[in-house]
Amino acid sequence: MKKLIILTVVYMMLSLASFAQNHKRPDSYNYNRAVEAIQNNNVEEALDYLKKELSDAPKNGYAYSWLAYVRENQGEYGMALSTTLYGCFSDTYFNISLDSLGIVIFCILRVLDKIWG
């Protein structure tokens, strides 16, 4: 439990640092609909739009980050981790490297917690 609290704090700090940077976020229809669906807790709709977005824009690191977020919240830590790592290397400009790093650390610790917990 202690690890999870520390990890959550680290993730929040990395996310805030990432948001503080001036990055241009995607403004496509599928991406915006996916984010809206996530905010409305409609996971299946979000997954559909994220898959469409990544089909249209395979180097959209933000879409990979949201997809990893959805997977992590579904308890699919391995999928979240692999999605995040793939997104880090697919994003041409590495715009979300700090945010992705937070997700990677979070997923690794969750998997280790499941194994050792």
Image: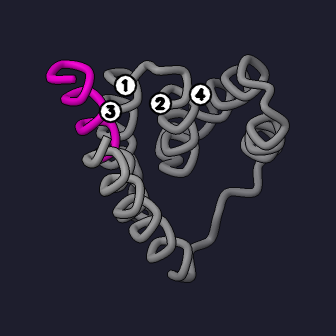
109 is within the stretch colored magenta: yes
Contact? badges 1 and 3 (CB < 8 Å): yes
Q: What residue do we see at 59% from left, 27% from top?
A: 55
Coordinates of residue 61 in the picture (x, y in percent): 48, 49
Q: Which residue is mark 2?
A: 72
Question: Quadrant of the image for the C terminus?
Answer: top left
Q: Which of the two discs, 1 and 3, sits closer to the camera?
A: 1
Report how far apart the C-alphas of labels 1 and 3 lie in the structure: 6 Å
CB atoms at circles 2 and 1 under 8 Å apart?
Answer: yes
Amino acid type of the residue that numbered disc 4 sits on in the rendered structure: Ser
Label 2 Cα crowd, 10 Å radius (few <14 / some 14-19 / many 20+): some
Residue 77, disc: 1
Give the residue at mark 4: 55
Helix, strand or loop at label 3? It is helix
> Callout 2: helix, strand or loop?
helix
Q: Nearer the viewer, residue 61 or 108?
A: 108
Answer whether labels 4 and 1 touch (C-beta < 8 Å).
no
Magenta highlight range: 106-117
Tag 3–tag 4 contact (CB < 8 Å): no
Looking at the image, which residue is at 66% across and 34% down?
Answer: 53
